[in-house]
Amino acid sequence: MIRIASSLAAVSQINLKATIEDLEKAGADIIHFDIEDGNFVPVMNLGLRMIRDLRPLTNLPFDVHLMTNNPEWMIPQLKEWGADMVSVHYEACPYPRRILGLIHQLGMIAGLAFNPATPLPPLRQYLPFLSFVLVLTTEPETRMDTYLPSVLDKVAEGKKRRGLEKVKWEVDGGFTAETILDAKRAGADIIVSGRGIFMDNQILLNMKKMKDVLSS
């Protein structure tokens, strides 16, 4: 079953408690956090403390995407504050296997994220720590972030690689009811959507449209 992760970076932060309640009613499967450092990407939208503050409000899994250089120091804090899944960027980690191993050792699900222009390297060397791969289908954190459907070829390629049968594939960037079928066809297991869910403040309607497409 394909799961939908709701990205909180796309919604107003004024009343996140009500937002979480609406996402649960709408059938969101995962809450997705993009944590930036202003260096690896030139913005800083969400902070780590939000994870701690929101954790008591829901039992939905928390998926934390670290868009940061030197993310290793954050990993124990994320465990303490209730993260379930943590992905780090291949481009930002000189030693990805070590960081994936730390995430795994602390009992969280470990993932490796890739920007659109980055080709997939050999991934078997990161087993058994690697549980999922996050493929960005827009350039990270640009205001005019163009959806890049050709990047989904990486998912289709990765799904065919021997030895990676247990690795899940997550995609993030530009997914709405009109584009989500592309991700399904490529073989994505988790689809992250931000503006596609919160568009026109119609969370229940937008989520229903996406789930209807996935179930068709």
Image (tube, rainbow, N blue to C red):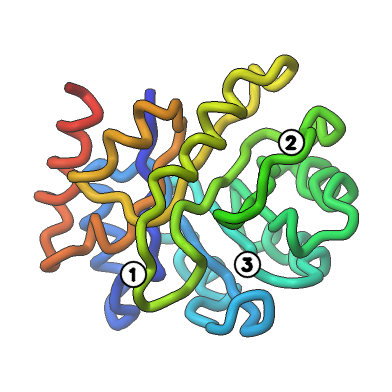
Say what amino acid the circle numbered 3 marks: Met
* Residue sitting at x 42%, y 29%: 186
When asked about the image quadrant of residue 173, the answer is bottom left
Number of residue marks: 3
Callout 3: helix, strand or loop? strand
Amino acid marked by disc 1: Ala
**In the picture, which quadrant includes the N terminus?**
top left
Q: Is residue 186 left or right of residue 156?
A: left
Is 212 drawn above or below residue 50 in the view shown? Answer: above
Residue drawn at x 50%, y 62% is 33
Secondary structure of the residue carrying numbered label 1? helix
Q: What residue did someone put label 2 on?
A: 130
Distance between mark 1 and mark 2 Cα atoms: 27 Å
Q: Sequence-wise, which precedes: disc 1 or disc 3?
A: 1
Q: Residues within 10 Å of mark 3 (few under 14, many from 20)?
A: many
Q: Position of residue 121 (x, y in %)?
A: 76, 40
The residue singled out by tag 3 in the image is: 67
Residue found 57% across the figure and 46% down from its top = 134
Q: Which residue is mark 1?
A: 10
> Mark 2, residues whose alpha carbon is within 10 Å: few (<14), some, or many (≥20)?
many
Q: Position of residue 17 (x, y in %)?
A: 31, 68
Residue at screen point 40% across, 70% down: 9
